[in-house]
Image (cartoon, rainbow, N blue to C red):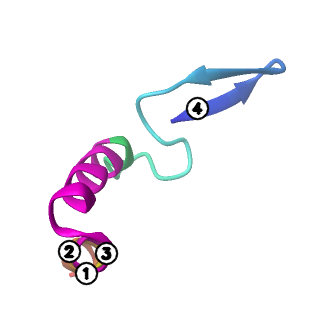
């Protein structure tokens, strides 16, 4: 994930918008799962993770 700072993109480890969520980790895991099980099942898993956070 990158942020535009002083006209340059710089890598960041944590989202400035959602600092409480491990978005970078989720993206890495999602890409791996997508390769393993496909797009639709990966999206279902991701939605389930989000629902668990809401509770």
Classify residue 7 by image quadrant.
Answer: top right
Q: Which is more N-terminal, label 4 or label 2?
A: 4
Q: Residue at x 20, y 81 (%)?
A: 55
Magenta stretch encompasses residue 20 = no
Along the line of sight, the residue nearer the viewer: 17 or 33: 33
Whole-angstrom CA distance, mark 1 to mark 2, is: 4 Å
Along the line of sight, the residue nearer the viewer: 5 or 28: 28
Residue at image mark 3: 43
| Image x and y of residue 10, in percent | 62, 20
Whole-angstrom CA distance, mark 2 to mark 4, is: 25 Å
Q: Secondary structure at mark 2?
A: helix
Residue at image mark 1: 44
Q: Which is more N-terminal, label 3 or label 4?
A: 4
* Magenta span of residues: 25-42
Along the line of sight, the residue nearer the viewer: 4 or 35: 35
Residue 45 — which label?
2
> Looking at the image, do the residues carrying marks 1 and 3 touch, with CB atoms under 8 Å apart?
yes
> Looking at the image, do the residues carrying marks 1 and 2 touch, with CB atoms under 8 Å apart?
yes
Residue at image mark 4: 2
Residue 1 — which label?
none
């Amino acid at each position: 994930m990158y942020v535009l700072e002083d006209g340059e993109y710089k890598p960041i480890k944590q989202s400035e918008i959602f600092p409480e969520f491990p978005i970078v980790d989720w993206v890495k895991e999602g890409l791996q799962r997508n390769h393993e099980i496909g797009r639709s099942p990966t999206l279902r898993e991701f939605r389930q993770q989000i629902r668990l956070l809401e509770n």
